Structures are given as structure tokens and as C-alpha cells.
Image (tube, rainbow, N blue to C red):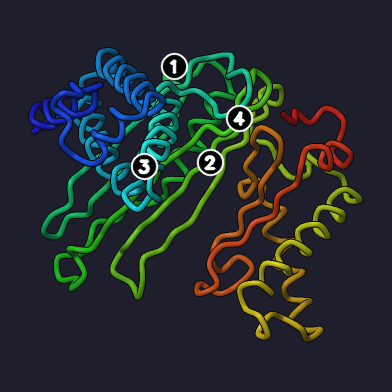
Amino acid sequence: MAGVLLVAATSCAPAFDCKKAATPSEKAICADPAALAADAAMSSAFSSLLASAPAAQLGPIAAAQVKWLHARDSECADSAAGTLGACLARQSTQRLSFLLGQPEAGPGAASRITPWFRFEKGGKGRAAIDIELLKFPDPTDAAERAFNAAADKLVGDLDQPEKDDPSADRFDYERSMRLTYASPRFVSAHLDAYQDVGGAHPATFTGNVNVDFAAGREARFDDLVDARGAEKIFSICMRSVAAQKKDKMGADAPKSADDLAELVKNVKDATRNLAAWSFGADKATIGYDPYAVGSYAEGPYDCEIPYATLRELAKPGFPLP
């Protein structure tokens, strides 16, 4: 099976012959120089990853890439006229960064970071699993080990369905990681997750790994700010979430003193968890998953804090990007 998947992936992942372009995506890539360059670079990185990966990873890498190619084309299929190539280029560039273990921002970590895959096709009474993490392949210090351990922890438990579970064929776990920032002092990675374990509805959630390399461990909220700084951040994020609730809920947005007090508490509790924080090029984003500060139907919320603001509140020595 792994051999079949490998052939399938390598036949469609590398840059293809534009004379034989058949699908809308292939035609759009060939018609757009930026999309063609992005596809070629991504395909080259994929081939290099296959060439250097351990044998046990070859099947999962190939299967995951085939699925990603279909997802890329599907994601861009509804692009406005004339923008399909740009969408495909953007998706391929993001995939290139993942395959190379490169950050979206920052100079890069001191040691190599590489993608790690687990891919299992679902079936009768068997969960479908698609996990794409980033890890230090040969961790040499406490910080690198802490990063790998935190990435594994974000995956969580992947339970298989019971034999008599009427939803046994629905079990599906997906995890995908992006390296949002990396330097020799600080590494931040973001994880998006989806799972369907037969409940009333599938669940989505996010998580982040933020490692302070000088401290040799995951960074904590108390490392970032003191009590005064924390209160200012809570105030910023409360205003942001309240505004988003007004946009989403209109007249049903919280108004009473009790409802607002509960919202303040929920925002503070969620914001204190640095695993909700993603650090990028010019700002930090706190993500509030469904249920964190509202009902599932409301969906996620977020709070963005530019570094120009955060630097004034951060403790001296915290390795902000």
C-alpha cells in the first residue's frame, strides 16, 4: 500500500508537464508564472523530503501529500474569475514552508525542524487519522525536547470506535501545524484540529506551542507580563471579543451585569493560557475556541495585539519576535 501511495504522490506532486495540463488547477498553474514557480518549488521540497525521510514515514508522507493536493484544489475552486492561480500559488507557498520546516516569520530556529506525519485511512470501525506536525528530528536540549513533547500533547487521545458504536464509520482526526515564528531564542507553532467522534457534531479547536529557548521550556503567561500588563491585555481582549459578539449576535450580545461579568472571567481565563497565543511577524493573536468565551454556535473569537503595544507591556527579557 505504501508503494502505491508513493507512486501516486510522486506522479502528481512534482511540477508537471504543462502540455498535459487537464484539470482547472493544472491549467491555472501553467497560466500563472507565480503559481507555476510556487508549485515547482513545493514539488521539489516534497521530493527532497521523500528522499531523506525514514522508511516508516514514506507512506504517510505520500498519502498526506495526495490528500493535501486535493484539499488545495478544492480550497481554491471557488476563487473569483482570474484569481485561481493566485490562490493556488498562496496554498503551494504555505505548503512549501511546512515541508521545509521553515517559519512564516523570523530568521529560523538554531536547529533543523522537519515535518512529521501520521496518516491512516479510515474504514469499517476504524478511525481516519491525518496528522501533520513539526518537530526537531534530533532534539539536543531541553527546549527542543519541550517543543516536541508539547506538539505531541496537542494531538491528544485518538480513540478508535467501539465495535457496536453506530457512528463507528464517522471517526476522523485531523491535525495540522504551522511554524508561525522561529528564532534561536523563541519558537511559536500553531495547530488547527478537527475531529468527528460520533457526537452531535464534529469539533474544531486550535493550540499553540511557544518555547523560550533560554529558559529551556514552554513559555508561560506570567513570563510575558506582570499583573499590571495582564490587566491591560485583558482589557484589550475584552473590548475585542465584545465587539465581535455584537457583530455576530446583534441584539443578543451580552448586556446584563451578570453576563458581562461572566464574559470578563472567561476572557481572562482563556487569555492566561499562553497555549492560546500564536506569535507571528508583527503581532500576537489569542485564539478563543468555541466554548471558551461563547457557545459552540457562536464559533471562535480572537484578539490581536500588535508588538508595538505588547512590547510596552511585556516583561524585560521575554523573547518577543
Reading the image, the residue beneath label 4 is 181
Q: What amino acid is labelled 2 in the image?
A: His
Q: What amino acid is labelled 1 in the image?
A: Asp
Q: What amino acid is labelled 4 in the image?
A: Tyr
* Secondary structure of the residue carrying numbered label 4: strand
Q: Which mark is residue 84?
A: 3
Q: What amino acid is labelled 3 in the image?
A: Leu
Marks 2 and 4, how far apart at CA:
9 Å
- In the displayed structure image, the side of residue 235 where residue 22 appears, left or right: left
Residue 89 on image: x %, y %: 40, 32
Reading the image, the residue beneath label 2 is 190
Q: Quadrant of residue 38?
A: top left
Q: Residue shown at 45%/38% (left/top)?
A: 177
Q: Residue shown at 87%/42% (left/top)?
A: 313
Q: Residues within 10 Å of mark 1 (few under 14, many from 20)?
A: few
Camera-side residue of 250 and 67? 250
Reading the image, the residue beneath label 1 is 138
Give the vertical position of 316 relative to 48 (above or below): below
* Secondary structure of the residue carrying numbered label 1: loop
